Image (cartoon, coloured by chain):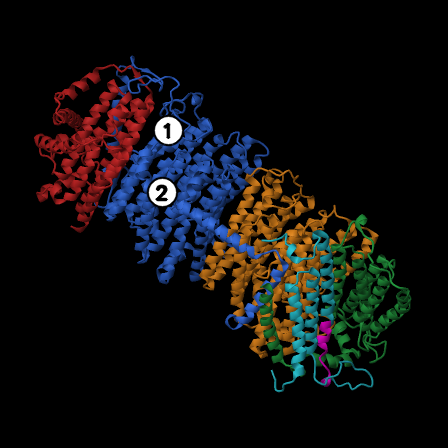
Chain colours: A green, B orange, C cyan, D blue, E red
Amino acid sequence: MKKIIVIILLGTLGFYTAHTFFDIGFGFPHFEHGIKDVYLQKTVSDLKVSNTVTSIVVNFRGFDTLGEVTVLFLAVTALGGILYKRRHEVGERSVLFSASSIVTSGSKLLFPAIILLGVYVFIHGHLSPGGGFQGGTIIATGFLLMLLTYENYSVNHTVLSLVESLAGIAFAGIGLLGFMHGGTFLQNFIEPGVLNNLFSGGVIPIIYIMVGFKVGAELTGVIYTVLHEKG
Amino acid sequence: MVGTPVLFIVIPLLAAFLIPLLGMLWKELVRIVPGLVLAYMLVLSVNLLNHVLIYGPIVEVIAGWRPPLGINLVFSAFSGFLVTLVVFMGLLIWVYSYRFKRNVDFEPAKKYFLLLMMLITGSVGIILTGDIFNMFVFIEITGISGYALTAFYTGRDSAEASFKYLMLGSIASTFLLLAIMIIYSQVGTLNMADIASKMHTIKPVYKIISFIFFITAIGIEAEIFPLNGWAPDAYTEAPGPVGAAFAGIVVKASVYAIVRYVYTIFDLSGAYDFLILIGLITLIMAETAAIRQERLKRMLAYSSIGQMGLVMVAFGMGTEEGVFAALFMILNHAIIKSLLFFSGSYLVYNSKHKYIKEVNGMSKYLPITSLLFALGAFAIVGLPPFAGFWSKLSMLTAAADSNMLFIIALVLIVSVVELVYYLRVVNRIYFFNKEEKTEPKKPTFNALIVMITLGALILVIGFYPDAITGILHKASADLMDKGQYIHDVLSLNK
Amino acid sequence: MNNTYFDLLDYMIYGTAILIILIGLYGALVKKSLIKIVIGLSVVDSGVNLLIVAIGYLKGGTAPIFSPGYLANPIKMVDPVPQALVLTAIVIGFGVTAVALALVIRLYRHHGTLNIDEIKDLKW
Amino acid sequence: MNYIILVVFLGGALLTFFAGKINNVLQDILFLASILVPASLFFAYVHAGNIFNLTLGGIHLSLGINAMSWLFALIVLGLGSMAAFYSVSFMKGKERRGYFYFNFILTIMAMTGILMSRDLVSFFIFWEIMTWSSYLMTVYNGKDVQTVGIKYFVFSAIGAYAMLMAIVVIHSINGSFMIEDLVRSFPEMPVNMQILIPVLLLTGFGVKAAIMPLHVWAPGAYSNAPMAYTSIFSGALSKMGIYGMVIVMVSLLSYVPEGYWFREVIAWMGGITAVIGTLWAIKQDDAKKLLAYSSIAQLGYIIVGIGIGTPLAMMAGLFLAVVHALFKGTLFLAVGAIERQTGTSNFREVTGLIRKMPWTFVASLISIISLAGIPPMGGFVGKWMLYESLLTSNHYLLVIVIFFSSTAAFLYCYKFLFGFFLGQEEKEWANVKEAPVLMVVPMLILSFFSFLLGTYPGIILKPIDAGMQYLGYGITQNHLWQTSVIFNTWGNQVVLQPLLYSIIAIFLFFLIFLTIKSFKQTRYVTTKDISSSGEVPKEHENLTFSVDFMQPFMRAVEPVMRRQIDKYYTGLANGLEALFDFMRKIYTGNGQTYAIYVIVFVVILLLFKDILF
Amino acid sequence: MNELWFDIMGAIVTVIVAFVVGITYMGLSRKITARVQNRKGPPFYQNFIDALKLASKTSAIHHGFMQHVGPAFMMITSIMSVLIIPVLRGNAWFVNLNFHGDLIFILYIMVFGPLGMALGAGQTGNPNSAIGVTRGLSQMVGFEIPWVMALVALMMQYHTTSIVDLMNVQIQSGMWLMFSSPFAFIAAVMAMLGMFRYSPFDIVGAPQELASGPMSENGGKYLFTLMSSGSIFAFAKLTLYVDLFMGGAGNLVELVIKTFALYLIPMLYGVTSPRYRTEQSIRWFWGWPTFFGFLAIIYAVVF
C-alpha cells in the first residue's frame, strides 16, 4: 500500500519535473546575458586562470567555497560529537579478516603514488581539470587504503585537526588579507601573472592548495572516526 | 563604521577553525571564544544597524566582483534587524549555556560551542546573503550544525530526532538545488537582485515550479505544515538552549528566506495568499496538537510552530503593516519563546521524560524560574501589558485593514486554544503539589541572568513598544521596496 | 523555450537524472533499513548533481578550460557555473551523508535495530 | 493627574508585594495606602476636563474621565476601599498575602484604567489586565484551577478576543482607535459592520457581565476567589461589562435602525439570565455558589434595564448596578467572614450563627432585603424603576419574566439567612466569635448605604443623571426623580420618605410592643427547647433542616433545570480535545512518513499550481 | 402639625376597621367551612375571643431577637398595605398613603411580611417552621405569576400603575374592570386562591403535617401579632381586589359586601378540595391561571 502511494506520488513528481526540464531543453544556451559569459571572459583577462571552474569556485564564488569547507569541517565536528564516547567506552577497530600480503605490499607501493597524484591535482587546479576538492579526496583515498589494509594503522588525530584548522585559518586569513588590501573579502590581491603558468592566478592556487589540505585532512578524519566505531 | 557585513561570517569561521587549536592551549578557551565572537558580532550588528537606519543599506561585495558576478551581502534595515536579533539571541544562548555544560566532557563541550556558533553564523549568512546558491550553502551549514546539536545528548532519543531532521533536511536540499537550477537555466544568474529584475522574462510555469520547490525546501526549515514533522522531535530532544536557538534563530532565518523569495525575487501574486493559507493551516494544526501534549518541550515546540504560522499569515498580507506585524511577532517570539525554553528546561531539568506533570508545584522550589515561565506564558498568548500583546494587536490591525475578518476570527480562536495549554502548565507550576521525587535543579547564575534579561525585555517592550517600533517600521518599509533593493545591489559599481 | 528539434539523447540525460532522483527518493521513502535510506538520500544527491551538470551542457561545446593548444572559444564552451555549483553540492552531500551515517550508528547503538519502523519513540 | 493615579496603583502593587518580605504590618499599611491614596486623589482631582494623551507603539492613547465613568469609578473605588479594609483583617495569617494584595490592587487599577480609557486600545489593555489579575485571584485557593480557573479564563479570552476583533475592525474602517470617533462614524458605517461590531463588543462585555449563554464561568470563579475579592469581582468587576454595554447600547446602537433588535434581544437575554441565575441559585448548598448565581441573576436585571434603553430603564439599570455593588459586596464579605470564623460556607454545615455573629447578620439582613427588592431598601428603588420602565415601554412578557425571577429570588434570600444564621444552634458552632471589627465595619457601612439609597435614591440618581446626559439622553431626567421621589414616564410616582417613616414607625411600635410586653416573664431559651408536634425533643435529636432545602420548588421546575448550558460547553470542549488528539496522530513519529508528507506537499502544490498561483 | 396628627388618626382608624373586618371574616370562614362540612363550627366571633386571649397571655419563652422582629415585619406589610390601598373612595379619613405608593410597591411590600415572618420562624429552630416557610415561599412563586400577569394586563391597558387611577377609570367608564378585563379578573381570582391559603393550597400551615408550620413556635403576644396582622392583611388584599376589579367602594357597607363576596370564592373553593403537594400547587398555578394571565395580556394589547 505504502509502496503504491509512494510510486504514484513519485510518478507525479517525476512527471512534472521531467516535463519542466524537457521543456527547458538540453544542449543549447537557454539565456542571453548570463554571468557565465562574463566569467569565461574575465577568467582569462583579469585572473589569468585557465580553468574557469576553478576561478569560479575559488574567486568569483569563493565565498561559497568557504562555506563548503565549513560544511565539511562541521561534518567532521558533528561526527565527533555524535559518535562521542567516554574514553573507556571507545572500542577497537573491527576488521573482518586481515588483508593478504599482496594487498599489503601493493598498498605500500600505491600509497605514495596516490598522495603524489592528489598533491598534483590540487596544485594544478587552476590550470587543468581538478583542484583542491578532487586532490583532497584522492589523498583521503590513500589513507583509506592504508586504513583498510593495516589493522593497526593509525593517523595522528592532533596532526589531522592541526592541518584542518590551519588550512581553514589560512583560507579565511587570505580572504581577510584581500579585504585589507583591496577592500573586499577574498580579493585577488597578488598580481595574477601569466596565463597557463604554474605560478599564476594570484591567490587562487594558494587557496586551492589550502582547500586541498583541508579536504584531505577532513575526509581522512571522517573515515578514521567512523572506522573506530563499533556497531 | 566598525566593520562590514562580511565580518559576520568570517570572524566566526576563523574562530571556528581556531577553536580546536585554542582548545589545545587552554581548555576554557573553547567556551569563551564563541562568546567573545558573538559579543563582537552583536556590537558589530548594532553599529551597522544604526548606520543603516540613517544612511541606507550596505551592500558588500566579495572578491571584488560587482553583484551579478560575485556574491554580495546585503545589510539593509530589514536584514540588519533580523541579524541583530539573531546575534543577540545567540549571545544570550551562549551565556545561558556557558555553565550549563560544565558537567559535560571537554570534547563534547568544544563541539557544542563550536556548533552553536556555526548555527548562528549560518543563520546570519542566510539572512545577509544576496545570492541564492550561497543561501543554500548557509542553509546547509545551519542544517548540519542543527543535526549535530540535536543529537548532542547521547543518553536520549536524540539521534532519532536528529535523523528525522536530517532526512527531511536532505530532501529539502534536493528541492532547493532543483529550484535554483530551474531559475539559473532561465536567467543565467544566481544573484537575487539580478534574478528579481529579470523575473518577468521567465515563463510562468517555470516560475511556479521553482517557487514550489523553493517553498518546499525552505518550508521544511521554516516548519510549515506538513513539512514540520522533525521540529517537535528536535525541539524535544535537543538541549534546552538549542531548542531556544531553533525557535529563536534558525526558524527566523528560514522565514526570512521565504519572505525574501516571496517579496523580492518572485513576482507571483498567488504566493501571498499561499503564505496565508499554509500559515493558517500550520497555526491550526500546531496549536491543536500542542494542547494534547504530555511533554513540556514538545508542547513548546508545537507552540513555536504555530507562532511561525502566524508570522507567515502576517507576511502573507503583503502590506507594510503586515510586514511590520510579522517582524514584531518574530521579535517577540524570539524573546518569549526563548524565555519559555530556558525556564522550562529548568523546570523539568532532572526528570527523564520531561513530562508536563513533572512541573507540578515547582514554584516552591524554583520561584524565579517559575515566575519567569509564567511571565513568558502570559506574554506569548498576548496578554497586555506584556510584549506579545503589541505584536498581536498590530497583526490583527493589519489583517483588519486587509479586510480579512475570517482570518482574524480564526487566529483569535486558535489563540484561545493556545491560552488553554499555557495556562494549564502555569497552573500546574503554581497550584499543584509536587509528586515526583526528582530533585529540582537550581538554575545557574548565568541562566538566571539570561532569563531575567529576557523577562525584563518582555516588560520593557510591553510597557514601551516605541523602543522597537521605529526600527520595525524602517525594516518593513525596506522589505516592501523591491525596486530599491534591486537598485541598491545592481547599481553598485566597484 | 525553444524546443525545435527532438532528440532521444536530450530526453535520456534529463530522464536518467530524474529517474535516479526518483529511485533514490523511493529508496528513502519505502525501504525500512536506515542504511538503505541513507543510500537512497545520496542517490538522490547524485541524480540532482547530474541534472545540474546537464543543464549547463552545450551541444558540441568544450570544457571551460583555456589550455594552450586548445581552441579557446568562449562561445563554444559549456557553462562552467553549474559545474562549480555541483562541486559544492557534492561536498555538502558528502558532509550530510557522513553525519547521517554517524546518526545511524548512534541509532543502532541505542535501539539495537536498523528498522525505521521500530524507531519511533518520539511521536504525536 | 489621570496617569499618576494609575502609576500610584501600579507602584503600590509592586511595593506591597515586596513589602511582604520585610514586615506584614508594613505590607498591610502599604496595601491600604495604595488603594486609598489613588482613590482619594481620584475624587479630589480628577474631573471631566483633564485628559492625558500618550502615543505608544504608534497608537494614540488617551485617558480621561467622563460623567458616566465617574459613576462607575464611584462603585469601583468605593467598594474597593471597603473591601480593602476588610481584606487586611481577612488576610491576617494567610499565606500568599503578597500575591493577594498585588492582584487586588492591580484589579482596582485596571478597572480605574478601563473607566479612564478614551480609546479602545487602552480600554482593551486594562480590560485584559483586569482579566488576568482576576484570574489569578480565582485560582488563589489552588482549588479546581484546571477546571474553574481555565473555564473563567477561556470565556474571558473569548470575550476579550471578540472585543479585540471589533477593535481592529473599527480601526480598519475608521483609522482611529478613539471611542469618540467610533461613536461619530458608527451611523455611517455599512450595515454589516453596524451589526458585526456591536455583536462582537457585546460578546466581550457580555462575558464579564455573565449574560446568559456566556455565564457558565461565573459560579465557579466567584466562589473560588477569596471572598474579600469576590465582593469586588461580583460587585465592581462585572460592572465593567455593564459599563461597556452601556456605551455600546447607547452611544452606538441608539443611532442606527438595527438598534431596536439589539435592544430587544439583549433585554430578553438579560431576562432569561435572570431566571436561570435565580433557579440555579435556589438549588445551591454553598453560600458562595448561591451568591454567585444570584449575581448572575442580578446582572440579568441590570442588562434588561440597559437593553431596554429608555431613560427610566437606563436609570434603573445603572441604579441597580450601584445597589448591586453595595448589597452583593456586603453579602460576599459576610460569607467571607463566616467562612473565616467557621471554616466553611456550606449551608448544610453551618447553622444558627445569629447570636454568635450578630453584626454580620444585621449587615446580611439589610443586604438581603435590598437584594430581594423589598422596600425600604435600595434594591426596591431599582426594581421599581425597572418594572415601571418595562411597563411604560410595552414589554409585557419581560415584566412577567423578571417578576418571576425576582419572586423566586425570595427563596434563596431566605435560604441564605436561614442557612447561616437561623435554625438550630448546633454545639459544633458554639464557640464561633464575631468577625474582627475591621471586617464588620465595612459590611455595616455598605449596608447602611443600601438602606440610605432606599429612601434617598436621589443621592445616586444625580450622578446617574449626569452620566446619562453625557451619553446623550435628554437634557435632564429630572422628571423621573427627586431626592426621595421617583416617577415613571406615565406620571405615577412613589414617595419614599413618608413610606419610610411609616415603616419605621410601625416597626418600632410593634418591636417595642413585642419586647416590652411581659418582658420580665419572658426568658430566652435555646433552639433545642421547642415543641415538635407537641413533644419536647431530646438533646441528641437532629432538628437541623438544611438538606434539600427548596426541594418542593426544585421539583416543580425540574424540567427547566435538566438542561444545563454548562454541560453543552463541557461536551464541546471534550469533543474538541478528542478531535485534536486525533489530529495530532498525523505526527506518526516515523521519519519516512514525514518524508512522504513532504512529497505529498510538493505533489499537491504541483497538481493545483494553476489554482494556487 | 395638625395634618400629621390627622393622618395618624386616620391611619389608626383604618387599621382598626381592617382588623375588625378581617378578623370577622376569618371567624365567618371557620363557621361556613364547618357548615359545608356538616359540622356546627365555632361562632363567628370566635377569632375575636382568640385574639383577646392571646393578647392577654404571658409569653414565657422566646428564641431570640428575630422572633421579635419577624412579627413586627409582618405588621409592617399588613399596615402599610392597608394604608396604601385605598379603602374608601374619597373619604378623607381613609386616604392615608394612597398617593405615595403604587401597584409595584404594593406587590413588593406584600412579600415583605411573609419573609419577615419566615425569619422569625427560622429563629425558633423548629424544623416544621422552616419546612412550612419553604413551602410557602415556593407557592408564592407559583401564584405570583398569574397575579402579576393580571396586574400587568390592567396596567398596560390603562397606562397607569396607580390604584387610585385604576379606580377612577372604572368610575368614569361606569364599568367594573372585572367585566372590561375579564381574563385579568379570572387570573387574579385564581391567584387569590393561593394567596388566601385555603385548602387545597393550605400547604404552608398544613396542620396535619407541620403543626401549623411557621406559626408553630409562636404563642401569646407573637401569635396575637401574627394573627391580627394576618386579618388586616386579608382585608387589605380583598380591598385591593375590590379596588381593582369592582370599582372600589364608596362606603363601608359597600366595601364589606364586595369584599365578602370575593372572600367566599377561595373559601368555598377550598372547602371541598384535598390538599395539594407543593409542586402540584405550583404547577397548578402555572397552568390555567397563567394561561388566563396570557389571555389577559393579549386582550390588553389588542384592545
- In this picture, is E294 found above or below D26? below
Label 2 residue SS: helix
Please report the bounds of the magenta region as a residue range: C75-86
Q: Which mark is residue B279?
A: none
- Percent position (x, y) of residue B200? 57, 77
User: Is E181 displayed left or right of D240 in the figure?
Assistant: left
The x and y percentages for residue E22 are 16, 27
- In the rendered structure, which disc, 2 or 1, sits on the residue that comes first in sequence? 1
Which residue corresponds to the image point at 37% horizontal and 51% vertical from the top-left? D247
Tell me the crowding category of disc 1: few under 14, some 14 to 19, or many 20 or more residues within 10 angstroms, Cα based: many
Q: Nearer the viewer, residue D38 or D307?
A: D307
Residue D312, position in %: x, y?
Answer: 28, 46
User: Based on the displayed image, in which of its 4 quarters is residue B199 positioned?
Assistant: bottom right
Q: Give the number of the mark in front: 2 or 1.
A: 2
Q: Is residue D418 within the magenta segment?
A: no
Task: Name the spot of residue D607 as percent of width and height, x first.
Answer: 54, 71
Residue annotated with mark 2: D562
The chain identifier of the residue carrying mark 1 reads D
Q: Would you say D245 lies left or right of D501 here? A: right
Q: Is residue E72 above or below residue B188?
A: above
- Labelled disc at residue D546: 1
Task: Confirm whether residue B190 shows in the render.
Answer: no
